[in-house]
């Protein structure tokens, strides 16, 4: 029996407000499979995921092998249900699996609340994996005193955290797309398959497959080393026809080609290509490209001496892509975009496409490009095909810039994290990765972030006492009014950031704490 009935009674045994309790329970059970689906979707090969009670009694067990995700729920009552999702599966299959798990936990395990279960995950070899809110172990005394408002707030925070995780996944995928396209197009390789824009919608096979002349398939994976660990990623092992193959093995690469849904469709439309591939008349080259935060790349092709480190070339324009007829086309960008904040009353805002950075009178976002001699703002037709991808691509490029260093300080009792003095320092408020760093440095899940002038960004904790608030207001106002460095003004206001994402904006920092 779960603790839900205890939770409903509350601190003093009252059962008043059953409608509020029911609404809170409903929202918790709606959120739980959303979170579970994502955690299982991103579980790496050789990963394990376990759901158990606070007492350590295991409810469910999931294991990611090379060719599928296997799972099982088992109750002391004799109930048992098994699950299987075969790779490469679409995200919708994980959503359906998570719904089945949630239904079983309620019906067969007697859980009134999904937060009565705790999750743990790891990779074979004991490397722990973050389970997000599912990993929180709420003791019974916490559940007994939980109010409906507390539960609804928990759901809100959980969904915001999940959205931030998905934003990071989308940013990573867009970075892989940009880096891989740039490299392959520069080398004259016709791209056949590639990652789609936005967050992943199915499990990965390989990132890119292209034709390098009439008799060679070029297969490329892109690994992002944005944290500067300077090491190869864990080599993936998958099972094919009873054999375990490792990433970089020629048979592994061929299996990836044949299991990739987009490539399989191309081979079905071109049987001559499929025949040449099966007969070994087409050479297959596989390479792993590792891109760091400084836009440097190094290669490990598993068959030859690795190429030395070298700077990634910065093309002036992404060439028009030539996808296979009938396949999904990735957007062709008119230039390599970066985001730039401008004041809300910028006089040219009606002459160039722009986006709001937040609600209200927040600064707007325009796009700029590296011309070689500096950055220049760009105009373009926003209705042209593919141009709706420009802003996500710009945010992805912003995230790929070398991690700007943070400086922490305490000014008259106010904890401060500064990221200033760099071309796009102010714009880092748009980068969930950078904001997560600020959360960590200030040990605060919510932040006030100011971008008073170009190249200036200051973050402080959300919870400020009267003196700290006064210091923050004065700091922002002085910086906004100080033109001694020649940096263009942006805003005297402040962004409210939670879980790495902008959720609100106050147009003047001196309005904080008023009313």
Image (cartoon, rainbow, N blue to C red):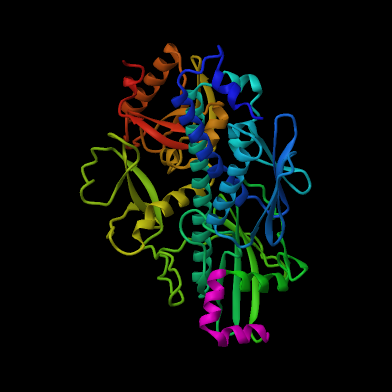
**Residue 236 horizontal/vertical position (percent):** 70, 59
- Residue 265 included in the magenta stretch of the image: yes
* Rendering quarter of residue 488: top left
Q: Is residue 500 above or below residue 494?
A: below
| Residue drawn at x 46%, y 28% as measured from the top left | 447
Is residue 206 left or right of 239 when viewed as pictured? left
Question: On the picture, is 165 further left or further right than 452?
Answer: right
Q: Is residue 26 magenta?
A: no
The image position of residue 505, as x and y in percent, is 35, 31
Percent of width and height locating residue 372: 41, 57
Q: Main secondary structure of the magenta part?
A: helix
The residue closer to the viewer here, 279 or 19, is 19
Name the residue furthest front.
77
Residue 499 x %, y %: 50, 35
In which quadrant of the rendered image does the C terminus lie? Answer: top left
Q: Would you say residue 444 is visible in this rendering? A: yes
Q: Nearer the viewer, residue 42 or 399?
A: 42
166 to 405, vertically: above or below: below
Left or right of 94: which side holds 423? Answer: left
Question: In which image quadrant can residue 511 be found?
Answer: top left
Determine the residue positioned at 63% across, 83% down: 277
Above or below, 269 relative to 338 = below
Taking depth in this image into account, of 374 and 233 the one nearest to the observer is 233
Q: Quadrant of the N terminus?
A: top right
| Image label count | 0
**Left or right of 465: which side holds 49?**
right
Image: magenta residue range: 261-280
Q: Residue at x 42, y 52 (%)?
A: 392
Q: Can residue 461 be seen in this snapshot?
A: no
């Amino acid at each position: 029996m779960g603790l839900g009935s205890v939770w409903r009674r509350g601190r003093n045994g009252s059962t008043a407000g059953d409608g509020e309790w029911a609404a809170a329970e409903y929202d918790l059970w709606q959120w739980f499979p959303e979170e579970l689906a994502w955690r299982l979707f991103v579980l790496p090969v050789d990963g394990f995921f376990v759901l158990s009670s606070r007492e350590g009694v295991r409810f469910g067990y999931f294991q990611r092998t090379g060719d599928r995700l296997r799972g099982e729920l088992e109750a002391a009552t004799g109930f048992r249900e098994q699950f299987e999702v075969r790779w490469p599966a679409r995200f919708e299959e994980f959503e359906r699996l998570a719904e089945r798990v949630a239904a079983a936990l309620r019906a067969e395990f007697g859980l009134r609340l999904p937060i009565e279960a705790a999750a743990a995950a790891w990779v074979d070899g004991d490397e722990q994996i973050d389970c997000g809110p599912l990993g929180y172990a709420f003791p019974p005394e916490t559940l007994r005193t939980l109010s409906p408002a507390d539960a609804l707030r928990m759901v809100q925070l959980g969904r915001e955290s999940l959205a931030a995780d998905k934003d990071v996944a989308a940013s990573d995928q867009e970075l892989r797309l940009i880096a891989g396209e740039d490299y392959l197009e520069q080398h004259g390789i016709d791209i056949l398959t590639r990652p789609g824009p936005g967050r992943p919608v199915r499990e990965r096979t390989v990132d890119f497959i292209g034709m390098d002349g009439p008799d060679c398939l070029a297969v490329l994976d892109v690994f992002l080393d944005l944290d500067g660990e300077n090491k190869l990623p864990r080599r993936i092992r998958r099972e094919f026809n009873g054999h375990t193959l490792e990433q970089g093995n020629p048979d592994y690469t061929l299996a990836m080609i044949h299991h990739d849904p987009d490539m399989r469709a191309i081979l079905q439309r071109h049987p001559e290509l499929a025949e040449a591939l099966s007969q070994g008349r087409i050479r297959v080259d596989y390479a792993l490209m590792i891109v760091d935060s400084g836009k440097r790349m190094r290669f490990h092709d598993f068959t030859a001496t690795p190429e030395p480190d070298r700077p990634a070339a910065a093309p002036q324009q992404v060439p028009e892509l030539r996808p296979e007829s009938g396949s999904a086309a990735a957007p062709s960008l008119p230039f390599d975009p970066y985001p730039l904040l401008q004041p809300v009353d910028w006089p040219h805002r009606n002459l160039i496409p722009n986006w709001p950075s937040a609600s209200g009178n927040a600064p707007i976002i325009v796009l700029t490009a590296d011309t070689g001699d500096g950055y220049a703002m760009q105009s373009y037709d926003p209705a042209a095909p593919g141009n709706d991808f420009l802003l996500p691509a710009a945010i992805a490029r912003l995230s790929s810039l070398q991690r700007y260093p943070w400086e922490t300080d305490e000014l008259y009792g106010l904890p401060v994290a500064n990221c200033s003095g760099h071309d796009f320092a102010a714009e880092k408020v748009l980068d969930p990765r950078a904001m997560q760093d600020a959360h960590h440095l200030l040990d605060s899940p919510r932040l006030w972030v100011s971008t008073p002038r170009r190249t200036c960004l200051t973050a402080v904790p959300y919870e400020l006492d009267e003196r700290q608030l006064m210091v923050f207001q004065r700091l922002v106002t002085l910086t906004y009014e100080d033109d001694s460095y020649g940096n263009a003004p942006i805003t005297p206001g402040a962004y409210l950031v939670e879980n790495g994402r902008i959720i609100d904006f106050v147009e003047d920092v001196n309005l904080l704490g008023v009313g």
